[in-house]
């Protein structure tokens, strides 16, 4: 059997969900990349939805959109932010997609009358997808995170696929990292290893065993505990790694680096690579922990109880805070509570900057209008993202242009002034899945604007996820009253970035800048928004 040139690292999880397998995968990616290797990361999701695009953010968190318009799991956001590689639809596969393609082929008659089964047909399709990420060959290492927890019925075909692949390509090309939890029991003052042991037993039932165990814990793991895990789970003690809670997720690669994780993986996979250079990340953490300034930004929207729904926005503030030598405190503002100027003053009065979040559905939208009004009238820096642009345009139309009943047709189909409306191409769309304006679109930025000052270039590309647009029939009146259309999509002529002329920093975009902010490379609009908010704070 020819040996595979691509090296695979599979990241599995045991004990329970939510242990940060995504961060672990992204961190291993960072370590591999810092050794000069070319790396990509993919995620296999066990659910039956074809993609998370239609899933409730309460259940699933943010939908992360890629350049090619695919709507993916939020872990893809971590991958891109950590390793600074643009991913595409091949980097995320769900059980729903796997079954859909196998069943489509069955209907086409491709299987020539065979009985279609989980093994080999589903597992073969899984193997094909895992390999497809590196076709044509561009990467030295493919990291593959498997969603779900060992023992879940849904994950079984994934584990079987990894077992088969490992058999085929050998341990020198296939590394299995297992993320588990060591709970601390107060009464006995002990970190317990039994759940980890059990999850490894469960893994063995299918014929797999880990090469490394990453143990999440809230405290240092004593050597005796590591020894025990090593003995019961058959991994060398050096490969029992402490993954302690940290102040910022960007510290995880550093902690893993210090325990030799990159080196251990590189050795088993016989990867030459240089020794790792992580000095930039060290500097980033140092600046994150010791900022000169502090400021508070309000994140205004409706899913404010569930920060995972806006994961990328929160991360973008970490990146842009560090670049401004500032700690950005986030205050969640539920816009359903804003129904008057007085309530705006009460909830927004102490903020240094106001960000109105993206969203769907009309709950809390009138409160977003109040946020935009407050920022405009009080010279508070404002960043509006997608719905945050749309509601600020509604506000401006109503209160500055005198179109008092202006609205988005998403919220009032019969408004006399539909300043935000559907594009003709959206009018007859009935299906919900993957039918929005999705993914990367070009934008021409006008010189001499705040947008230009941020990007410092005229041609940019940003990611979208929405149906409604600024109605160009209203562009003239909006411009006449002081809006500046500073970014335009050249093919469709649609507004991408709008700003207010007579305001220190009021910038809004129809796209999602948060999806392209990366560690050590903050997004220009977030960076400038934080800078403007800091200036506002220092001046007041
Ligand atoms: N609901 C709006 C639209 O579909 C905004 C979407 C968003 O904020 N992502 O256009």
Image (spheres, rainbow, N blue to C red):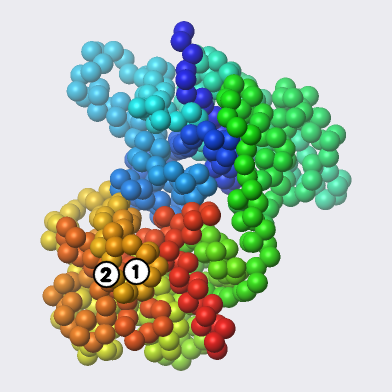
| Quarter occupied by residue 210 | top right
Instruction: Let me know if residue 334 appears in the view.
Output: no
Vertical placement of residue 135 versus 251, above or below: above
Instruction: Name the residue at 62% across, 74% down.
Output: 293
Q: Position of residue 232 (x, y in %)?
A: 76, 25
Instruction: List the single residue furthest toward the top.
Output: 1
Closest to the observer: 328 or 102?
Answer: 328
| Residue highlighted by disc 1 | 452
Vertical placement of residue 320 versus 344, above or below: above
Instruction: Name the residue at 20% across, 65% down.
Output: 494
| Residue highlighted by disc 2 | 446
Instruction: Let me know if residue 108 appears in the view.
Output: yes
Instruction: Indicate which disc, 2 or 1, sits on the residue closer to the N terminus.
Output: 2
Quarter of the image where the C terminus is located = bottom right
Few, some or many residues within 10 Å of mark 1 (<14, 14–19, 20+): some
Vertical placement of residue 8 versus 306, above or below: above
Left or right of 532? Residue 255 is right
């Amino acid at each position: 059997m020819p040996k595979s040139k691509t090296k695979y690292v599979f990241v599995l999880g045991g004990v329970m969900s939510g242990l940060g397998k995504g961060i672990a995968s992204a961190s291993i990616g960072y370590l591999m990349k810092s050794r000069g290797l070319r790396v990509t990361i993919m995620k296999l999701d066990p659910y039956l939805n074809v993609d998370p695009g239609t899933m409730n953010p309460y259940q699933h968190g943010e939908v992360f959109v890629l350049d090619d318009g695919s709507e993916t799991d939020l872990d893809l956001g971590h991958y891109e932010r950590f390793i600074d590689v643009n991913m595409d639809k091949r980097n995320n596969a769900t059980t729903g997609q796997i079954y859909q393609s196998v069943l489509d082929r069955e209907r086409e008659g491709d299987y020539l009358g065979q009985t279609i089964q989980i093994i080999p047909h589903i597992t073969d399709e899984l193997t094909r997808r895992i390999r497809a990420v590196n076709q044509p060959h561009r990467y030295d290492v493919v990291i593959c995170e498997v969603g779900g927890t060992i023992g879940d019925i849904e994950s079984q075909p994934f584990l079987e696929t990894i077992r088969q692949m490992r058999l085929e390509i050998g341990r020198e090309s296939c590394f299995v990292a297992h993320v588990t939890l060591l709970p601390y029991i107060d009464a006995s003052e002990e970190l317990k290893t039994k759940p980890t042991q059990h999850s490894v037993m469960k893994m063995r039932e299918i014929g797999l065993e880990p090469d490394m165990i990453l143990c999440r814990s809230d405290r240092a793991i004593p050597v005796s505990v590591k020894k025990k895990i090593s003995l019961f789970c058959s991994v060398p003690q050096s490969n029992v790694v402490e993954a302690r809670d940290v102040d910022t997720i960007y510290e995880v690669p550093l902690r893993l680096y210090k325990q030799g994780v990159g080196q251990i993986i590189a050795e088993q996979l016989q990867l030459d690579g240089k020794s790792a250079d992580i000095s930039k990340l060290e500097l980033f953490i140092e600046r994150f922990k010791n900022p000169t300034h502090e400021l508070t930004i309000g994140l205004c929207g409706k899913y404010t109880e569930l920060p995972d729904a806006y994961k990328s926005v929160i991360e973008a503030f970490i990146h842009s805070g560090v670049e401004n030598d500032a700690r950005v405190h986030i205050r969640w503002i539920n816009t359903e509570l804003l129904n008057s100027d007085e309530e705006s003053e009460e909830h927004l009065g102490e903020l240094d900057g106001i960000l109105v979040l993206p969203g769907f559905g009309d709950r809390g939208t009138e409160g977003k209008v109040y946020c935009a009004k407050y920022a405009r009238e009080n010279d508070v820096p404002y960043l509006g993202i997608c719905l945050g642009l749309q509601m600020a345009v509604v506000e401006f139309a109503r209160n500055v242009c005198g179109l008092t009943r202006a609205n988005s047709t998403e919220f009032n189909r019969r408004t006399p002034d539909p300043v935000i409306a559907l594009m003709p191409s959206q009018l007859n769309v009935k299906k919900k899945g993957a039918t929005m304006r999705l993914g990367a679109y070009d934008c021409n930025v006008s010189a001499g604007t705040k947008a230009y000052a941020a990007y410092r270039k005229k041609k940019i590309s940003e990611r979208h996820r929405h149906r409604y647009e600024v109605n160009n029939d209203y562009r003239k009146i909006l411009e006449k009253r002081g809006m500046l259309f500073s970014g335009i999509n050249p093919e469709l002529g649609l507004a991408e970035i709008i700003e207010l002329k007579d305001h220190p920093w009021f910038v809004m975009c129809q796209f999602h800048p948060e999806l392209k902010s990366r560690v050590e490379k903050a997004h220009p609009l977030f960076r400038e928004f934080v800078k403007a908010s800091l200036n506002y704070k220092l001046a007041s």
